[in-house]
Amino acid sequence: MTANSLEALASAGKGRSTRTLLRVVILCLIAGAAIASRLFSVIRFESIIHEFDPWFNFRATKYLVANGFYKFWDWFDDRTWHPLGRVTGGTLYPGLMVTSGVIYHALRTLTIPVDIRNICVLLAPAFSGLTAFAAYLLTNEMTTTDSASAGLLAALFMGITPGYISRSVAGSYDNEAIAIFLLVFTFYLWIKALKQGSMLWGALCALFYGYMVASWGGYAFITCLLPLHAFVLICMGRYSSRLYVAYCTWYALGTLASMQIPFVGFLPVKTSEHMPALGIFGFLQLVAFLSYVRSAIPGRQYQTFLWLFAGGTFAVALAGLVIATSAGIIAPWGGRFYSLWDTSYAKIHIPIIASVSEHQPTAWPAFFFDLNLLIWLFPAGVYLCFQNLADEHVFIVVYALFGSYFAGVMVRLMLTLTPVVCVAAALAISSVLDTYLVAKAPAPPQVHNAEDASEASVKKASKGGLKSTSKPVVGVYSYISKGVVVTAMTIYLLLFVLHCTWVTSNAYSSPSVVLASKMPDGSQHIIDDYREAYQWLRQNTREDAKIMSWWDYGYQIGGMADRPTLVDNNTWNNTHIATVGKAMSSREEVSYPIMRQHEVDYVLVVFGGLLGYSGDDINKFLWMVRIAEGIWPDEIKEREFFTPRGEYRVDGEATEAMKNSLMYKMSYYNYNALFPPGQAQDRVRGVRLPDVGPTLDTLEEAYTSENWIIRIYKVKDLDNLGRDHTSAAAFERGHKKKKATKKRGPRVLRVE
Amino acid sequence: MRWLPAFLSVSLLGAASLAAKVSPEERFREFHAKSLASAPIKLADSSYAKLTNAPRDYTVAVLLTALDTRYGCQLCREFQPEWDLLSKSWIKGDKSGESRLIFGTLDFSDGRDTFMGLGLQTAPVLMFFPPTVGRHAAASPDPIRYDFTNGPQTAEQVHAWLSRYMPDRPHPPVKRPINWMKWITTFVITSGTLTASYVAWPYVLPVVQNRNVWAAISLLSILLFTSGHMFNQIRKVPYVAGDGRGGVSYFAAGFQNQYGMETQVVAAMYGVLSFATISLALTVPRIADPKAQGVAVLAWGGIMFLMYSFLLSVFRVKNGGYPFSLPPFM
């Protein structure tokens, strides 16, 4: 290579249009990488909807595509929450379904026939590319130079960081799939509106905020963060007409937009989590008024008066808020929200919230697992924001504090922290790379010159700067230093890419509807019990056969088997869920009337004992007991499911309540027939089971899947001869009706 | 013939109560008078037997506890004030004994035999003896146990539990006394702080407006939150734990678990790594002397590399299958 061509190569990046082209190409490559790394599950398994909630979203999308928007809006679903039904159109966030529906119809207009399922499966990866772009825009707002390195790095981080991939792999068709893009983009528009004081950007921000409200319950995060940012700015004495215009435009239009969603309705003016936004709106009006007065009437004594007036009004408003809340005019704090502040609240009052593993606090390995090196670049990036501390940097600092607190309290909110981590880490690493990737070395200084310069700059920067930036920048002298730092950073970044790919491939790409295991020869074995069982239900039961199961499986039964369920994952009715919990954890004699009253035809349980599948119902059983105990403390007692030594056992030493509970009986019914006598084993709990298995009188086994993961039981009809089921079953087994036999077994209790 | 044991036991019970030679009514009056003087009544083996003896036409709630520091029962000591408060406010609200409930406390040091007789391994245990005769008689004379499985309970929770087993009887509510001491302390501290801040305001203001202070506060809280401090708060994890071989284990096994010390070590590692990054990005390019700069680059780069390598090795302890590592902590 000649020196000429080298020069040409170096100057190629200088032109403005070349740079733009390079940026576009790099962003496209990043979007490609973001989409590609989310496709593991499609390649390994197939194009399938994952987990639990996405099945409902998928079902709703199919309904929307088939029946049109207005029918969807008024949809009353009588196939869930039997016998109550659910006003689905008014109790969901429609953004996701409408987005897929629009894409579907747009593609059809372009005469591209795509199955709606494929759109749903690939929606989250497609939006992750947009999220990367939004992160690029947001980060570019933070840097003063026109160098886009920080923005491009942020886009890259956002594209492949596992903290975001965890919720957006192909098939994970959940609200978060589009919500994170909307979150980042709304923040970008907010910064833009704030910087320019532009009503147009503010209105765009409100528009995307409205879209966000229509998509995800996590919109409250924006609703709280933007007022907080505005409040901090006012406290720092940075009130400006730009802030006033941006905030008021966003608040007024955004609130109106959010109230158009039936599920949200009047919440923005009623509930406490929306109050900060309203309070800051009012506060801003006062501040604006007072600053107008100050500009109109000169006088130094006004300043004291103004602050007193503003503070007093704020205190009065706060007192009014407290009174209105305690008087019940404003709704009390929502349970999920409240559990974020008082961390022991959920455990005591709402077992149903505590039972969801997403609502658990986050241990440190989860942070490192999801963010890798970003987690320690994050504080460095926040520190760099203090360097200039313009309005937009204050936003990053506030977001970082707010987001990391909530991510620490609830695993799920790692998702809202991830964008700011990516932005801050990109700022840090680009600042390092920008410093060390300069080919030109500074001239070694004359000693007295440098001292003069530093003294002068100390005087200049001592007012309101950071201590570490008080001296002037000289640059890096030696190529060795540059080489060492750049090499190390490259190694870390490559390691980050490897880490992300590894995490995505190993942890976040399992559909959990289909399980995979390795055969002894290393080949992959697919365990497809869920779909097998749901297909059985679809083909062998009446169209309106009611299925009772624990609520985790409600959406899947509705989506895959298309049968009515008693409870599903939309946990709005605690009592109804507790009823199912009671039926599962009581004796057959208690459960049978409950099931008859709810017209249950089949009961479905998930049992992992044969395969060693730990997410089964016996392991979730204590939550059923707890939730049922919350409603019927006299009939169900958690204590009775523990042995006197406080152990939760399922083997021969299990407690009587455990052995007689419907859940235990359904799980282990006929199980010991699989093994030679005396060797029945539960591979999840790792215990040997008693020789004699449980007997079922009121249910009969209808179907058990290949690996026994799903077991379905049919609820027996009333006996033809009017006997109770216990005696009928005893007669079937050939027991004569004599007192000696009646003395044995659990039936004795019933006779007395 | 099957009737014989039952008959015998009944007659024996009768004999026992005859031996006590006091009618249930008298016993209730005696114990109620005692509890008016000081509730809950402090019991011993003999008085416990006398109080809970069947037949009884009144209800008894006895807390079996071990308050002595020798037994190291943290839960007992935490619950005791709540229990005293509950019984005092109940008795105060029901001076005439309409609810026919007697509160008693039996400490392990006074009632060794009773604990042995009941076969109790743990404390505290709250026993509820429903009446066996009379208007409120329960179907089963067996006492009901209250569980302390969920950690320390408040007086209100126990009150709700008691009320559930005593329908259609008065349930005097728990009245927490106004904590005058706390109010006075709060008032004094608040006014003191206000005065102090008013006086010190000219000196405090530069600190409040100092960017370095805010940067330090922000970074510390971010490090605290991202290293799992909130998990420690919520789950109340131990600071360190034994490893079962007499040593101390600083890192909890398992991905979903951690110790207090562990999170501090992790926060420190993150802090060192961040600080190295900040130094490389901000401080080093401002060093005017080329030699000093070279040394600083190598030092910070080396610290960063070693620390990251160590962090990865710690993470491999938590997540056994993690494949990546950097030298020297492979």
Image (cartoon, grey):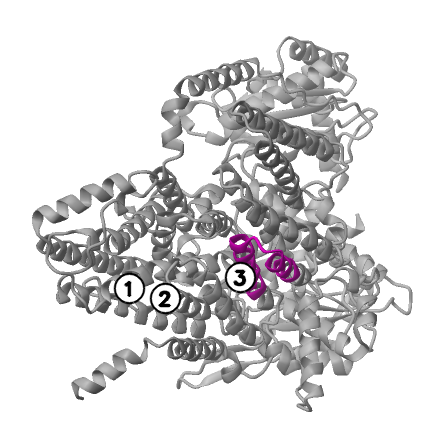
Reading the image, the residue beneath label 2 is A147
Same chain assignment for discs 3 and 1: yes
Q: Nearer the viewer, residue B131 or A637?
A: A637
Residue B326 x, y percent position in the rendering: 24, 66
Residue at left offset 68%, top offset 57%: A661
Identify which amino acid the numbered label 1 is placed on. Answer: Asp
Identify which amino acid the numbered label 3 is placed on. Answer: Val
Residue neighbourhood size for the residue with mark 2, other residues' Cα within 10 Å, grouped as few (<14), some (14–19), many (≥20): few
Measure how far apart labels 2 and 3 are at the Cα level: 21 Å
Q: How would you classify the magenta stretch by its main secondary structure?
A: helix
Q: Nearer the viewer, residue A383 or A572?
A: A383
Residue A406 x, y percent position in the rendering: 51, 49
- Indicate which label's residue lies in the foreground, 3 or 1: 1
Residue neighbourhood size for the residue with mark 3, other residues' Cα within 10 Å, grouped as few (<14), some (14–19), many (≥20): many
Question: Which of the chains bears the disc numbered 2?
Answer: A
Q: In the image, is residue A194 part of the stretch drawn in magenta?
A: yes
Same chain assignment for discs 2 and 3: yes
Measure how far apart labels 3 and 1 are at the Cα level: 25 Å
Residue A438, located in which quarter of the rendered image? bottom left
Magenta residues? Answer: A180-208
The answer to whether residue B136 is left or right of residue A61 is right
Decide which of tag 1 and tag 2 comes sooner along the chain.
2
Q: Is residue A25 above or below residue A52?
A: below
